[in-house]
Image (spheres, coloured by chain):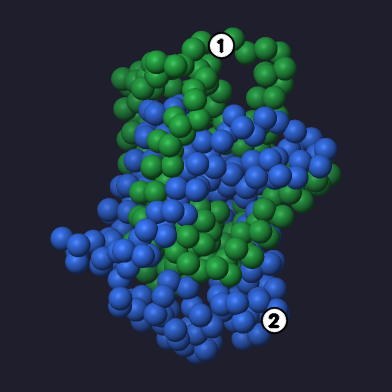
Chain colours: A green, B blue
Amino acid sequence: MEQAFQHTPTPQELADLKARELDAICVNESELVHPWWHNLKYAAWGILFGIVFVKAEIVSWFRIQEMFRFESFHMYGVIGTAVVVGLISVLLIKRTKAKTIYGEEIHIPNKEFNKGQIYGGLLFGLGWAITGACPGPLFAQMGAGFGVISITFLSAVAGTWVYGLLRDKLPH
Amino acid sequence: MLEAIKQPWPWYVAGALIGLTVPYLLLVGNKSFGISSSLRHMCAACLPANIKFFQYDWKKEVWNLFFVGGIALGALLAAQFLSDPNPVVLSEPTAAYLAEKGITDTTSLMPSEIFSWDQLFTLRGLIFFVIGGFMVGFGTRYAGGCTSGHAIMGLSSLQWPSLIATCCFMVGGIAMTWLILPFLLTL
C-alpha cells in the first residue's frame, strides 16, 4: 500500500485498456501501481477457492451430469447461493459506497449485449456437459491430480486462440 | 474437526464461499470476478501472433493468473490432505443411467472410464478432451465469460446480457446431456 503511487493513464494505455475490455467482463483499470507480491492476495483466495471446488465436488464430472439431468439439487444450490451472496454483497458495496482497501472507488463495468452471448453461450454449454468443467474447474482438476485434463486445458486455450483469430468474421 | 472437513461439503457452504469471491475481489483490488479471461491472457502472453484480440498488456491482468494458479494449488492441497476416502455419492437415477452406459467407477471425482491417459488416442479421448475443451475455450470467449464471469459476477451485478448467456449455457448443456451424450458415451 505504501508503495502505491498515483498515475494518470496515457492515450496509449487507454487504447490498451480498450483492447483488454473486448469481450471481457473482468477488466478494471487501477490507477495504482503495486509491486508484484500484491497479487498474492488473489492467489490466496484462489487457494481457498480450489479447496472449495474439490471439497464440494463442483469439479466432478458426475455432479455436472446430475445437474443437467435434473437429478440432484447440489449444483443448483451452489450456484444459487453464490448468486444470492454476490447480489447482496454488490448491493451493500453500492449502498455504502465502499472503497477498495487502497481507497479507490469501486467500479463494476457494464456488460453490453451482443449475439456472442447466445452463440458462444450455447457452444460453451455443449462443451461443459462433455468435459464436466468450466474454465475454473479445469485448473482444479489438474491440481487435484487428473493429469489428462491438461489436454482438455490446452484445447481450451487453443479454442480461445482460434476465437481471437476468427473474431472479426464471427457474428456479434 | 478434520474428519468433518474431509466429508463432501454441503452446497450452502460452497455457494456462500464462492459468492464471497465477488466482494473480496472488488474490495481488495477493484477486480470483477471472472476466470475464462485467464485463457485469453495466456494466449496474449505466449502466442499473440499479431492477432488484434491478443494485442494488449497482459501483465496488467496478471492478478487473474495468480488467481487461477491459486485454484490449482488449492485443489492439490485438498486432494492431498483433505481427501474423502469414500466414493462419490451419486443420485440413484444418475448412477443407474451411467451404469447402463458402462460408467461405474465413482472412486474419484472423474470417471476413469473416460478421463484417463489410456483414452487419449481413442475417439472418446478426441471428443471428451480435445473437442470438448476446444468448445469450452472458444465458447466462453465468444460469450464474453463463463460460469463465474456471467452466472455469478454478471447476475450478482444485475446485468441482463449475463442472464441471457447463463440461460444459453444451460440450454447447451441440457441439449448435450439429453440428445448427444447418450450416443457419445457408447463410443
Q: Which residue is mark 1?
A: A7
**B44 up-or-down from A11: above or below:** below
- Quarter occupied by the N terminus of chain A: top left
Badge 1 amino acid = His
Which residue is drawn at the image coordinates 40% and 15% (left, top)? Answer: A2
Which residue is drawn at the image coordinates 51% and 10% (left, top)? Answer: A6
| Residue A66 x/y as whole percent | 43, 71
Compute the Cα span from label 1 to label 2: 54 Å
**B130 up-or-down from A39: above or below:** below
Which residue is drawn at the image coordinates 48% and 67% (left, top)? Answer: A145
The residue lying toward the viewer, choosing from A50 and A22, is: A50
**Which chain letter matches label 2?**
B
The numbered mark at residue B142 is none
Q: Are marks 1 and 2 on the same chain?
A: no
Badge 2 amino acid = Thr
Asked which secondary structure carries label 1, the reply is loop
Q: How many marks?
A: 2
The residue lying toward the viewer, choosing from B6 and A162, is: B6
Q: What is the crowding at mark 2: few (fewer than 14 residues within 10 Å), some, or many (at least 20)?
A: few
The numbered mark at residue B122 is 2
Q: What is the crowding at mark 1: few (fewer than 14 residues within 10 Å), some, or many (at least 20)?
A: few
Which residue is drawn at the image coordinates 59% and 10% (left, top)? Answer: A8
- Quarter occupied by the C terminus of chain A: top right
Q: Residue furthest left?
A: B1
Q: Quadrant of residue B126?
A: bottom right
Residue B180 horizontal side relative to residue A34, left or right: right
**B98 up-or-down from B176: above or below:** below
Residue B99 horizontal side relative to residue A158, left or right: left
Residue A8 horizontal side relative to residue A36, left or right: right
Asked which secondary structure carries label 2, the reply is loop
